[in-house]
Image (cartoon, rainbow, N blue to C red):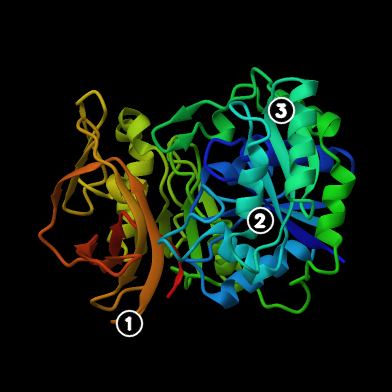
Amino acid sequence: MAGGVIIAAPASGSGKTVLTLGLIRHLATAGVAVASAKVGPDYIDPAFHAAASGRPCINLDPWGMRPETLAAAAATLLDHAEIVVCEGVMGLFDGATASQGSTADLAVGLGWPVVLVVDVRAQAASAAAVVAGFARHRPGVRVAAVVFNRVGSDRHADVVREACRLTVPEVAVLGCLPRTPGLDLPERHLGLVQAREHPDLGSFLDRAARLVADHVDVSALMALGADPLSPSAGGGQPAARPIRPLGQRIAVADDIAFAFRYPLVIDGWRAAGAEISPFSPLADQPPDAAADAVYLPGGYPELHAGRLAANRTFLEGVRQAAARGATVFGECGGYMVLGRGLVDGEGHRHAMLDLLDLETSFADRHLHLGYRRAVLPAETVLGPVGTGYRGHEFHYARTLREGPGQPLFHCSGAAGQDLGPTGLVQGSVLGSFVHLIDED
């Protein structure tokens, strides 16, 4: 029976992404039907997973998703795989708040065992105390195994293995990964440089796969997923439908400037009977003229603002859609493009769609980060008054002007703090900086 394993760590930067990608690539190359998932509101890591496995990666968010959405998403993964490899977020117990939304919450909810990745470049036997602390910190979280990363020598490996055997014998040591130059992924202001922009991604994934094959007991890791203690959530679950469709034929912007969208949302629209029509604004493609809805997801329009401003066919196509009454919905980067202008990091202003009274700037960046509860104060295509969503905000744009006008949402943070109105609605055009994950 298929099951899942969660690759987690005590903290970000421990090496769980490289281990996860190497494991997925190794299993896929060996002919194993491997599916993958990423915990939390992440758009970038899942694209690397998909490149490694050849299958879409699904986000599993214990704060942002209703239990029934999580169950359906897990079932979707398990129904078509021999094993699901799920990469955690931040540290194992870090989440939306001190007590909600962590990778540990997901492990408890799905019953999947945890493989802890511990960076030991600055410690030896003390690593066993870290493993013991994490393994025994929270009842119900089964830290079944550990992989030590950035190990300096065979002697170093022997010490950490023996210390773990003596201190926490219930946690299996699956491997010791040596320090390996050249396996760092380039980053920019929202995380890793996107997979489709990586100059030699195939070679990187193959190197990571060889590292895992040479230094990790993959058979033992596979057995954890098939362990009777790791229940399967597959079989008979309905498709996840997190957000109601924007229309019957939805044109979805899809390129490196507009890549931040959740597969579960798009698949949920299809399951509800909507037809999806992709188009590329960067290639100066207009949305399908027959579409009754246009979706501009987030991404990096600020890096391509001059090119977008010059793409008249794209701009006029979206304006024409709005003029005929089609829904035009933008999230984060897509929201900025719906505005009047966008100032790039060098201080140059670029005219955008001018469908909403919005001006944004990256010339003086300011971080906006956190989970959001978003409630509709007025009826829109997203639902009647009072409809609630859970979502996430992560961007560095400064808002120079937003409105006046009808706000799209009234928002609060994960801990309940009131964040006030956000976003704009003008006729059939609407958007905000919030990436919607699921209805509340």
Nearer to us in this view, 65 or 352? 65
Tag 1, which secondary structure? loop
Q: Kindly check if marks 2 and 1 are in contact, taking CB atoms under 8 A apart as contact.
A: no
**Amino acid, disc 2:** Ala
Tell which residue pokes out farthest to the left in this image. 404
- As measured in the structure, the alpha-carbon distance from the residue carrying label 3 to the one carrying label 2 is 35 Å
Residue positioned 59% across, 51% down in the render: 88
Image coordinates of residue 182 in percent, x first then y, are 64, 18
- Residue at point 50%, 45% (across, down): 254
Please state which of residues 158 and 26 is positioned toward the viewer in this rendering. 158
**Left or right of 147: which side holds 122?**
left
**Left or right: residue 77 compared with residue 294:** right
Q: Nearer the viewer, residue 149 or 54?
A: 149
Image x and y of residue 168, in percent: 74, 50
Instruction: Give residue 237's quadrant in the image.
Output: bottom right
Residue 384, disc: 1
Q: Amino acid at mark 3?
A: Gly
- Taking the image as drawn, is residue 192 in sight? yes
Under mark 1, the amino acid is Pro
Q: Quadrant of residue 106?
A: bottom right
Provide the residue designation for mark 2: 135
Earlier sequence position, callout 3 versus callout 1? 3
